[in-house]
C-alpha cells in the first residue's frame, strides 16, 4: 500500500473491516468554525458543554461532536490501521457523532456492539496519505459498501435494542 501512495495520490482498494477502536469514537469541535476543542479535564459533565470547551476563535461554547475512528482493515495482501473522519464514518454509522453519542448514553455497550456489527463488512475504500505531516495513519477518503445487504450500524443497534426491550 505504501508504494501505491507515492506522490500523495489516493488509491482505491477493497478492504474488510477487522476491528475498530470503540473507546474513542469522536471528538468535540466548535459548532460554528469546526476547530478542534481541547478535551475537558477534571469533572466534565457530558450533558453540558463545560467552560473548557470555549472556542478561542469564536468565543462561544456551542459545540458538536465529529467522528474520528481508528480501524484495522485488511486487503488481500496486508492488514493496516486507517482513520475515518466524520464524513466517511457517517456512512458506516448512519448518523451523526452527536446522535450516536446520545444513543450510547442510554445503551452503554453500543460502542462494543458497533465493532461486532461492522466486523467483516467489505468496502471499496479510497485511501490517502494523511493531510497532516504528524499524522500516523492512512486516511479513508471514501467508503462504499460492497454488500447489497449493508445496513448502517445505528439501524442495526436500534432494531436490536427495540426487540430486546419489547420481549
Image (cartoon, rainbow, N blue to C red):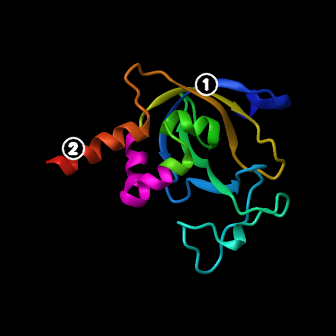
List the residue tagged with mark 1: 13
Residue nearest the observer in this picture, 56 or 69? 56
Residue that appears at 81% across and 53% down: 134
Q: Depth check: 117 or 45 in front?
A: 45
Relative image position of residue 66 (x, y in whole percent):
63, 49
Left or right position of 104 against 43: left
Is 130 placed above or below 52 here?
above
> Which numbered circle lies on residue 104?
none
Residue under the point 49% across and 39% down: 93
Magenta range: 100-117
Count of marks overlaid on the render: 2
Q: Is residue 1 placed above or below 146 in the rendered structure? A: below
Q: Position of residue 51 (x, y in %)?
A: 70, 73
Mark 2 residue element: helix
User: SS for tag 1?
Assistant: strand
Q: Nearer the viewer, residue 119 or 166?
A: 166
The image quarter containing residue 61 is bottom right
Quarter-wise, where is residue 57 in the image? bottom right
**Where residue 44 sits: x, y (%)?**
58, 74
> Where is mark 2, residue-wise?
163
53 is higher (above) or lower (below) than 70: below
As measured in the structure, the alpha-carbon distance from the residue carrying label 1 to the one carrying label 2 is 36 Å
Question: How far from the left and from the top, in percent, is residue 127?
Answer: 68, 31
Amino acid at each position: 500500500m505504501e508504494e501505491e501512495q507515492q506522490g500523495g495520490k489516493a488509491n482505491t482498494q477493497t478492504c474488510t473491516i477487522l476491528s475498530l477502536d470503540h473507546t474513542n469514537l469522536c471528538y468535540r469541535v466548535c459548532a460554528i468554525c469546526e476547530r478542534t476543542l481541547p478535551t475537558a479535564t477534571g469533572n466534565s459533565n457530558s450533558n453540558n458543554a463545560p467552560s473548557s470547551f470555549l472556542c478561542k476563535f469564536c468565543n462561544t461554547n456551542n459545540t458538536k461532536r465529529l467522528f474520528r475512528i481508528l480501524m484495522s482493515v485488511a486487503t488481500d495482501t496486508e492488514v493496516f490501521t486507517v482513520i475515518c473522519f466524520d464524513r466517511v464514518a457517517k456512512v458506516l454509522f448512519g448518523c451523526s457523532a452527536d446522535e450516536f453519542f446520545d444513543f450510547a448514553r442510554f445503551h452503554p455497550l453500543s460502542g462494543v456492539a458497533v465493532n461486532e456489527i461492522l466486523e467483516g463488512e467489505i468496502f471499496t475504500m479510497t485511501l490517502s496519505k494523511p493531510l497532516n505531516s504528524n499524522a500516523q495513519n492512512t486516511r479513508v477518503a471514501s467508503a462504499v459498501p460492497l454488500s447489497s445487504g449493508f445496513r448502517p450500524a445505528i439501524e442495526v443497534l436500534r432494531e436490536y435494542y427495540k426487540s430486546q426491550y419489547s420481549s
